[in-house]
Image (cartoon, rainbow, N blue to C red):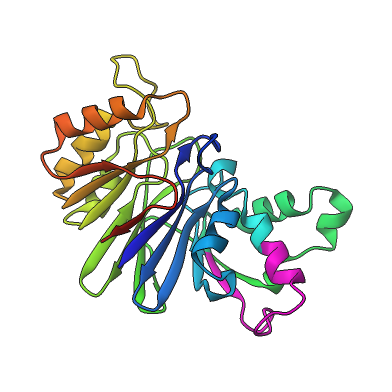
Amino acid sequence: MKVVVLGCSGSGPGPGSPASGYLVEAGGTRLALDLGNGTFGALQRALDPWALDSVAFSHLHPDHCADFSALAVWRRYHPAPPFDPTRNRLPVFAPVEAPERLGAAYAPSAAERAETDLEDVFAFGALGDGCEATVGGAVLRAAAVDHLCEAYALRVEHGGRSLVYSGDTGPCRGLVDLARGADVLLCEASWPHTDDMPTGVHLSGRQAGEHAAAAGVGRLLLTHVPIWTDPDAMLAEAKASFDGPVELVRPDGEYEV
């Protein structure tokens, strides 16, 4: 199993990276975790979009889902699809409001929304705390985390290996429990650690390391560093609180799980 970083810039795209998006290859199964601003172009460098088996969204802030509209256009209007996309709808696992929220982003006017139902080419499934789904040869699990909206950490398991993606979250037990014993934790590190950090929004580099240590993961990959945050500071904080291997991901990087 491996993860390909489509984008890793926190809170929006930066000059060298799209926003959040990750392609997980688990045997013959290919699953996208989030599709933030600019990630659909990166996806096309890594994979024929028709070969995608599913998409899972940690939450519905634009930096994690904005390029779903580009995927919708691809599946609805490509002039030469290799199969009928209305008969082979792409599974989408996301918070319960996803069909309405993503439909509004795709068709912003009331008149257009009235005539647009993205379920012609997508099959939406609502995530929930503790839910589990099978995607091809992989298992997808979700746990509610602490963010400004409905949000989930996601775990992908295949062939005895496991990857956990934090999505966006403040410190929470749900992430630790989901990541317990995982081979890799792909975790956000959004700001320096201070005594007056807001709660229920993001993790510091130190907190990312603390969550990795508490969960006993094998390896920590840091992501979602905003352009205004020093990535080297996030790396140093995480290394100070987690004894295992720690690395900052890079755009288009491939990481074995």
Report how many numbered discs are placed on residues in the image.
Answer: 0
Task: Indicate the position of residue 150 as horizontal and vertical percent values.
Answer: 49, 45
Say which quadrant the C terminus sits in: bottom left
Left or right of residue 57, residue 129 in this image: left
Left or right of residue 38, residue 211 in this image: left
Quarter of image, res 169 = top left
Q: Find out whether residue 79 is within the magenta segment.
A: yes
Residue pushed farthest left?
243
The residue shown at (51%, 63%) is: 55
Left or right of residue 70, residue 19 in this image: left
The residue shown at (41%, 75%) is: 29
The residue shown at (71%, 73%) is: 120
Task: Indicate the position of residue 199 as horizontal and vertical percent values.
Answer: 37, 26
Vertical relation: 199 (above or below) 97: above
Quarter of image, res 124 = bottom right
Vertical relation: 122 (above or below) 242: below
The residue shown at (71%, 56%) is: 103
Residue numbers of the magenta segment = 72-92
Q: Nearer the viewer, residue 41 or 88?
A: 41
Quarter of image, res 243 = top left
Task: Indicate the position of residue 249 as horizontal and vertical percent values.
Answer: 35, 45
Say which quadrant the N terminus sits in: bottom left
Vertical relation: 94 (above or below) 202: below
Task: Indicate the position of residue 66 as horizontal and vertical percent values.
Answer: 62, 48
Vertical relation: 44 (above or below) 194: below
